[in-house]
Amino acid sequence: MGGRRAGKGRPADGGADEGVLRLRAIGLEPGQRVRFRRRAGERWSQGTAARVEKDGSIGLVDAKGAARAIPTERLEVCSPGPRGGVRWEALADVAARQEQLGLFRPDASPAPPRRR
């Protein structure tokens, strides 16, 4: 029959694997536009984010359709600027901001009130 092996179905969480969940945890969505440099001083190439690899690099698909694993320090994320234009930010800055936003989420348990 088909080429699928037993046990190779969708993950139990509705289709997102661990790499995609880790990608969302740092503030990226699968398919989001990114740009990268393979080496320092090289020109920027564009691609789309796909997942976080096991070694911590970001898995992406470049403009030619090739899969790449790029270290986070060589990656920038496309985000809207203050006046609606395109702005490129280092992934480390986006991830740091995402970590800090977790402190202000309403689902986090509030600190107990202090007694006076």
Image: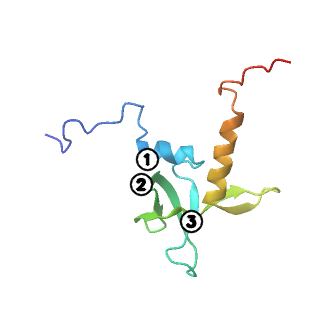
Mark 2 vs 1: CB contact within 8 A: yes
Q: Within the image, what quadrant is residue 83 found in?
A: bottom right
Q: CA distance from mark 1 to mark 3?
A: 18 Å
Return the residue at label 2: 53
Q: Pointer 1: what residue?
A: 19
Tags 2 and 3 in contact by the CB under 8 Å rule? no
Residue 89's place in the image compared with 18, above or below, is below
For residue 57, the mark is none
Q: Residue furthest left?
A: 1
Quadrant location, the C terminus: top right
Q: From the top left corner, tell me how far across and down residue 64 is, in percent.
A: 44, 68
> At numbered mark 2, what does the secondary structure look like: helix, strand or loop?
loop
Front tag of 1 and 3: 3
In whole angstroms, how far apart are the C-alphas of marks 2 and 3?
14 Å
Q: Count residues near mark 2 (Cα–Cα under 10 Å), then give few for <14, some for 14-19, many for 20+.
A: some
**Mark 3 = which residue?**
73
Q: Count neighbours of disc 3 (C-alpha within 10 A) and say few if under 14, some if 14 to 19, many if 20 or more.
A: few
Where is residue 2? Give x, y as percent. 17, 42
Circle 3 SS class: helix
Q: Looking at numbered disc 3 in the image, what kind of residue is underneath it?
A: Glu
From this view, report whether residue 20 is shown above or below residue 13.
below
